[in-house]
Each structure stands twice: as C-alpha cells, then as structure tokens.
Amino acid sequence: MRTTLKIILPLIVSVASVSLFFAANQVRTDKRNLRNDLSRRAEILGESLRESVEPLLEPSPEKDLQYFIERFGQRDHLKGVAVYNSVGAALAITASLPAAFKLRPRAATRAAQEGAGVGEFLNAEQTASVTGDSSGSIHIYALPLHRNGEIAGALALFHDISYIDKQVSGTLRDSLLSAFVQTVLITGFALILVQWTFTVPLARTAKWLRAQRTGQPNGPPALSKGEILDEIHHEVTHLARDLNTARAAAEEEARLRDSNASLWTAERLRISLRNKLQEKPLFVVSNREPYMHVFNEKDKSINAIVPASGVVTALEPVLRACNGTWIANGSGSADREVVDEHDRLRVPPDRPSYTLRRVWLSDEEDKGYYEGFSNEGLWPLCHIAHTRPIFRPEDWIQYQKINRRFADAVLQEMEGTESPILLAQDYHFALLPRMVKEARPDARVAIFWHIPWPNPEVFGICPWQRELVDGLLGADLIGFHIQSHCNNFLETVDRAVEALTEWDRFAVNRQGHVTRVRPYPISVAFPENSHAINESPSAGVERAALCAEMGIEASLLGVGVDRVDYTKGILERFRAIERFIDLYPAYQQRFTFVQIGAPSRTDIERYKSFLSEVSAEAERINTRFQTSRWKPIVFRKKHHSHEEIARFYHASSFCMVTSLHDGMNLVAKEFVGSRDDERGALILSTFAGAAHELSDALLVNPYDISQLAEAIHRALEMSEEEQSARMQRMRHNVREHNIYRWAAHLLSDLTEIRIEIPERVETPQLS
C-alpha cells in the first residue's frame, strides 16, 4: 500500500494543481469577456444617445434633457445617465444615480478633454469613495458632446456590474467543483490501473520467481502476456530460464558423473572448456557470421537471422561461457547499421554473451577472394569432382589481401589478452594462421579444414601450394574430418616445403615450430526431444500432406537435401532413379524422389550452369515417365527451413547422399538424428567422410548408376526389423559423436598444447 501511495499522491497533487490552474484561467477569461462585452454595449448605446442628446443642447435644455434621459435610463444593468456642461455641472441626471454624480466623474472629464469616448471600471470601494455610499461596483462610459463644432459637455452612462461578479463567482464555484470531481475520478482510475498493471503483475512475478527459485513442481502459472511490464517480464523470464538451465546442467553433470556416461551436451561443453580456458576468451574467425542483420522489405525494420551452421551450434556455448569474440565477414544487408564505431556488437540479440566483430569486403574483394580463389580454385581442387579448378593471379592477390585483413582484425581483438586462443575455420583462411602466429607467437592457433584434402599430386596443381601449406603450418593444430585427409596433408607437406614430418605422432616441425595434424569428425546436435513420427497413420498423413502440397500422388517417398553443387552427385542420383524405374516398373506411380536443392554461389558461372543442368535432367526424366498426377522426381530448387526439411525426413523411406567427394556431409547425420522412429534407410556415398562412421548405411559408389539403382530398390524393400537395427546403431553413433564432442576434443587438444616461444638470437655484426 505504501508503494501505491507513493505513486498516487504525486498524481493527486499534479491533477489538482492542473485543474486549479485551468479553473483560475477560466474565471479570468470569463471576467474579461463579460467586461469586454459590457464595454462594447456601453459604447454602442452611448453613440446612439449622443446623436439624440446633442440637438437638445439649446439654451435652457434641462427640461427636455431630463425627460429624455429618464426615458432611456430603464435598460438592463444601466444604473443611470448624466449630461454635463462644459464646466462639469450636471444639465440632467437620472434620479437613480447618487447626488455625488451631479459633478462629472473623472471619465467624463477625460472624455471632454480628449474629445473621445472613455470607459472606466470602479469597484465597490472606489465607488464608495466617490459617492459616499456602498452602491456597488459600476462601469462609467463617457462621450464628449458637441455644439456648433465645439465640445459643449459630456454624456456619461453608468452600468451596474454586480452581475459580472455573480457570474464570475458561479464560474469559480463550478470550476472548483469540476476540478475536485476530476481529481477524484482520475485518482480512482489511476489507483485501479496501478493495481491492475503494476501491483498485481509484480506480485504475480514475485510469486512466480519464488516458485522458480525454490523449484516448486506445481508453482503458479507463467507470466501473463501483454502486460505493461513486458520488458521486465522478458528479462525475468530469461533469468528464470538461466536458473532452470543451471539447475538442469548441475543435475546432468551429476548424472553423467554417476553413470560415467560419455554423452556431450552444450552445457557439459561449456563447463568443461570454461575450466580449460581458465577464464581466457576464445577467438573464432570464419567467413560466415553466426548472426546476420537484414532489412525487412515490408517496413524496412532490421531482423536478426541465424544462418544454418553446425559450427555455430558447437562453438556458441563456448563463446558464451568465456565471453569470446567471433570475427566474420559482415554480409547482411543491415549489418553496418547495428555495429559500433569499432565494427562490433554483442550477440545473441536476446541475451548478449559474446562479441561479434565484422570485417567488410567490397564486391571486387569478395569476387576475388571468395568466389574466385576459394570457390573456383580451392573448392574444385580439393573435391576432385572433375571440374577444372581456375587459378587467376588477381584472385590470389585478393585472397592474400583478405587473409591479411582478417588477421589484422584478429590481432586487434587479441590486444591485451595474454596467451590468446584462436580457432580459424575452413579453406578461406589458409594464410591466416602464419600471419597471426608471426605477430603473436604466444597465441595457440588452430584451423579446421572442413573440406577434403586431396593427394599431393592433385594439390600440386595449385600454383601457390607452397604458400598455402606454409600458411597452414603457422597453426599449432590443424584439424580434418578423417584420417586419410590428414595423411594426404602430411604427404603434401613432404613435397611442397622443407620441414620435418613426424609420421609417428602426426606432426610437422618447420623451423622449430611444431604443428599437430589430427582428425576430428564433425557432427550435428542430436535432437534429444524430437517427436516420434513412425510408419503409422501419422507418418502416412505427413506423406499424404506433402504429396498434396506438391500436386502428386505417391505412396513412397525418397529425399535428397543438398546445395546445388557439382560435388554432391545430384545428376548421378537422378540417372539412378531413371535406371531404377526402368528395372522395376512396378514402382511407377508409387514412388517419387524429392530433391531439395538450395541454389548456391549462383554468381559463379559453373554453379549457374550446373543448376540449369540439374533442372533439365529432372525435366527429361519426368517427361519419360510422368502422368497427370505423378512424376518420378520433384526438384524443389529453393531454400527450405529446418522445419520444412524435417517433414520430408520423417515421411521418406530413405535419404540419398551421393557426394562425389565430401569432407563429411552432415545431411546424412541430420537424417539419422531426425529418425527417432528408427525407420528409414540411408544411401550414402563411400566418398563422403560420414561413410567412415555410418557403416550401417547402404554404402555406394555414386559413379556406378546400376549400383545406385539397386540401393534404391533395397532401401524400399528393406524389412522394418533391418531398418530398425541399422538405424539404432547409426543413431547411437551420431548421438555419442555429436557436434559438442567434436568441439570439446578439438578445443581441449588446443588448450593442452604447450607453447614455447623461441628466443631471438642476435646475429653479431661484422665490422
């Protein structure tokens, strides 16, 4: 109640003060208007009387004048009329006026002197001083009288103004009453509003927080929506969520310790690496940023979006735990609008926990560094997908320039941090480890290469292989997906640069600096709380709904999910479907394959032409077999959300991953993770890194079209028992070797590396 009074009392004083101010202003205004109105009426009446009085100013005019003014002296509020001669004596005066006015008043004197009308208000005291009695307040209006062109006297009109005082008193009384009523009503409504919007919600919030703090299982309901305290509720909700998360994490850690379980979670990763990092921040550099800001086309507002990335999923818990920094290319249309003067901002937007530093690239730089050298040179070179890599000197110049720019940004962010830890991502930054290490030899530097590393003969095609390998060897730790990529890299080192390759411990010693090379198979975040969707009516309903949306009729679905990239084996996949239908025509009008193909790097000519090739091949095969309500291939060439893709995963009999060469391919693991019904089959290329872990998939050579066709048939004919057995083993693998385990092992190995800074040896000067 005391708090309510503190809010209400100032409101009462404020409302009362404002109401009284307006009441006083109303009284003044009414009084002024009434007086002005009386003055105008007196002036009009005086002019009218003067026209009649002046002709009567003849010798001995008293009788006629007296009769005339007595007749006109009976008007409303007119107290009397008097006519004075040039010396101020009354020629005629109404009987209602006091005898004192037989001598002209000051207003009449001024009118005669000035030759113009003069008005004057006298209050009761002033009137009494003139007349000697309490005849009340009056208004005197006087006009000069003329005869033969000269002023011969004055005409004076006396009005009783007591009615004005009465009206003003009434207005004052009404205004005060209105002010009182307004104050009472507003205060009452304010009291109700405070109770409704502040007191009750705050009491409910306190009760809810108490339940959260004490862990009551059946506490009060969550906070109401749409309250005036939405922002406080928003923060309180986050606080409660953090409390619940911390409680759950503690329980999970205790359970893991008790059971000696090996499952890694985001919270376990956060706690583990927070201890290993010893309060030091983690620095991550990648081309892709964890949050993009884009303009909303409708209202030009700014929205924050999260690009699909397993790396973001894995590293965010660590960056949050250690208040780290992520350095990335600012590629969103509104990215520049939200950073500070140092190109930084705190993320995530809803709960800022670490720093995002954006680096800006011009269109020319992006074309040379990213589209050119990275994706027209290194990408086809490393994937060995029979697309000729293109190496242009101007692209190499841009690649070096941008690596230097990112390295400078990293070094700026590292200033003031002792023995910093850096994790660089992917083939876009092969030169950066050396650049950072030369400037900060005390830093622990790792780079993870997300694409394959080819054999030394293939990598030798690159004109700048020596510079790339030397740049990578600036790192203390280089990570690849699988062991064979590590082997290929060490063989490339042997041929490209002068260094000691230590095959027994998979390390390279170059000029006294040791670089360790290790496999770290990347994975996905296993969906622990997904909803079970099995081959029951619910799965059938999902499949029927998808078919209806696509305008086809089919009882069996297969799915492929890829960027439209020439390394993914999409054309081979389509030809295998054609071969399958030729071999097993009974599946016509029963089976449809859905290819979800997100357009990728369409500014590069090879990708643009490949998208056209894929579309044309799907159209050619459909033309052979399709009917009015069925076709064998549905090519959905657009970006799909995780939720949209999950529907196809759940409704499909198999997922097809036919990469011609791939570092890992997370689609295979995403499909396995989504199938909590333990149904469905995975057809997986032996040239994808995932094949080394998911041996229960149907492993295929994507170049062997007949083998692919038979794998499709086997997947569709596989018994539920075999599906379940295979899927259980694959799901166990993905669950145990998830994205958090990948980050934990990689960063744990990096933090345990002992950094020995070589002492500079002074070379003696020759005299």
Image (cartoon, helix red, strand yellow):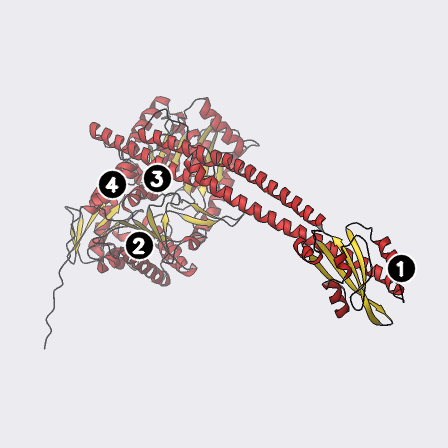
Report which residue position mark 4 lands on.
Answer: 744
Residue 687, visible in the rendered structure: no
Judge from the rendering whether residue 189 lies leftward or rightward of residue 309; answer left or right: right
Between 414 and 492, the residue placed more toward the observer is: 414
Q: Earlier in the sequence, mark 1 or mark 2?
A: 1
**Residue at image location 32% in from the left, 40% down from the top:** 688
| Image position, residue 184 (x, y; %) | 55, 37
The reply to whether callout 4 and callout 1 are in contact (CB within 8 Å) is no
The reply to whether callout 1 and callout 3 are in contact (CB within 8 Å) is no
Amino acid, disc 3: Leu
Q: CA distance from mark 1 to mark 2?
A: 121 Å
Q: Earlier in the sequence, mark 1 or mark 3?
A: 1
Depth-wise, is mark 4 or mark 3 nearer the camera?
4
Q: CA distance from mark 4 to mark 1?
A: 124 Å
Q: Residue 358, located in which quarter of the rendered image?
A: bottom left
Report which residue position mark 3 lands on.
Answer: 666
Mark sitting on residue 63: 1
Q: State which quarter of the image contains the N terminus.
A: top left
Q: Secondary structure at mark 4?
A: helix
Between 565 and 708, the residue placed more toward the observer is: 565
